[in-house]
Amino acid sequence: MPDLLGVNLAVSSYDEVVTRCVDWAKGSEPHAVLFANVHMLMEAHDTAGFRSDLNRADMVNPDGMPLVWALRALGHSNARRVYGPDATEALLGAAQRAQIPIGFYGGSEATLSKLVAEVERQYPGIEVVFQMSPPFRGLSEAEDDNIVRQITNSGARWLFVGLGCPKQEAWILEHRNRVPAVMLGVGAAFDFIAGSKPQAPRWMMRHGLEWVFRLVSEPRRLAGRYLKHNPRFVVLFLRQWMTRDMLKAR
């Protein structure tokens, strides 16, 4: 797997994600599938423990175009974007066809209710066997154990987790050996499918400008994040790229 700022990223595709998740659903082992953007990579850069945990995931897919461009610049010409919300849609279709029981963990109660209703409308017959909007606070050990028990007893083989980055990734990786399911950190997919938040136009996504759309939509929440992470990502990537070229030249 290629390394970008110390994180092992998968050079994958939507078809590969679906195929692997379908295969994993046939067993009872836990798996972690994540979708990385600049924010996640910078959180991993800043926190060694989080970076180490990410590198134990089964797949960390490049969710944003800046990561795809960076991978291509590092020599991985076949790198492509695997966008979490689009992967979610592809997986929901596969779950409907293969009758794979699924669950949703995260989001507000209102968003989760709209999400499940929309999923059941778009994918008739899909088996949604678990849904929970956890409280926006730390959980006690007993509460956490109870949630794990409910997920396990539901029989969900795919658990879509939407807690926001990096909380959802941390939760998945902390519970990887406790929840016998394929856990997918899909973030904003909950809001997009539920219709709670708009998505950026596709042309902005293709040109790596999705962050501009989101910043305009939620300036108070996102301005600090983008100002902190985006410039540092560019500097750190250029350092990695130049170091790689210097090593090749020796």
Image (tube, helix red, strand yellow):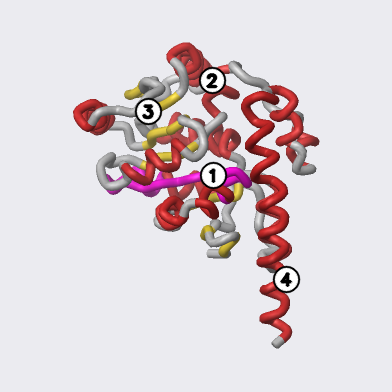
Mark toward the viewer: 3 or 1: 1
| For residue 86, side relative to residue 169 (left or right) | right
Mark toward the viewer: 2 or 4: 4
| Residue at position x 35%, y 43% in the image | 25
Mark toward the viewer: 1 or 2: 1
State which tag comes first along the sequence, 3 or 1. 1
Residue matched to label 4: 242
Mark toward the viewer: 4 or 3: 4
Query: Considering only vertical position in the picture, is 179 above or below 231?
Result: above
- Is there CB contact under 8 Å for labels 2 and 4? no
Residue matched to label 2: 122
Let me know if residue 143 appears in the view. yes
The span from disc 1 to disc 4 (Cα, nearest Å) is 26 Å
Question: Is residue 37 part of the magenta span, yes or no?
Answer: yes
Residue matched to label 1: 35
Q: Secondary structure at mark 3?
A: strand
Q: Which amino acid type corresponds to the residue marked 1 in the rendered image?
A: Phe
State which tag comes first along the sequence, 4 or 3. 3
